[in-house]
Amino acid sequence: MKLFNLYIVLTCLLSLNGLNAQQTPAKPQSEPITIEGATAHLGNGKVINNALIMFEAGKITFIGSANTKIARKGKIIDAKGKHVYPGFIIPNSTLGLVEIDAVRATDDDAEIGTWNPHIRSLIAYNAESKVVESMRPNGVLLGQITPRGSRISGTSSIVQFDAWNWEDAAVKVDDGIHMSWPNNFTQGRW
């Protein structure tokens, strides 16, 4: 009887493991945030020592020197001695289209046919991909999801990596059509 009870308890505990199967997207920002005193590395190569960075409603509203006379709002984070970098963007990627290369059922990056301008990679994007989840903690926040394969592969879209599904992830839909030029040179048998 004790063994049966232990079996029931272990089964219940192990079944709870599935509740944490997917990372939950972050909640919308509820209050303004100010980061003060950090070294800010901007995307254009400029570095601001003793910087002031302000966020409101999930968007950056100010970046400049901490000596600037501006009202600090909401939660203030003292980041002296720390560095702040922008989120990285991965261009021309198949993230979310391919989960495991060796398993055809998880490979949605290439369609059959030579001319596929109507193919939209966004529709096949899997926001629950474990590969996508592994990119966020490393600072990659956005990506251009691009189809592969034929002469005209289809359209790519820009997505953010913190979403429940492809509709929530879309930042810019159908941002370009991708083509592959044929090789003009042929090699002989030798």
Image: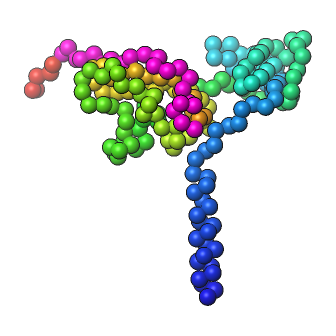
Q: Is residue 50 above or below residue 125?
A: above
- The answer to whether residue 8 is visible is yes
Q: Indicate left or right for 85 with 160 as reference.
A: right
Q: Looking at the image, which residue is at 50% across and 41% down?
A: 129
Q: Looking at the image, which residue is at 15% across and 19% down?
A: 186
Q: Indicate left or right for 42 with 131 as reference.
A: right
Q: Nearer the viewer, residue 84 or 134?
A: 134
Quadrant (top left/top right/bottom left/bottom right) for the N terminus: bottom right
- The stretch in magenta equals 164-185
Magenta stretch: includes residue 69: no
Q: Position of residue 35 (x, y in %)?
A: 81, 25
Q: Looking at the image, which residue is at 58% across and 77% down?
A: 7
Q: Position of residue 143 (x, y in %)?
A: 52, 26
- The answer to whether residue 79 is visible is no
Q: Is residue 48 above or below residue 33?
A: above
Q: Quadrant of residue 140?
A: top right
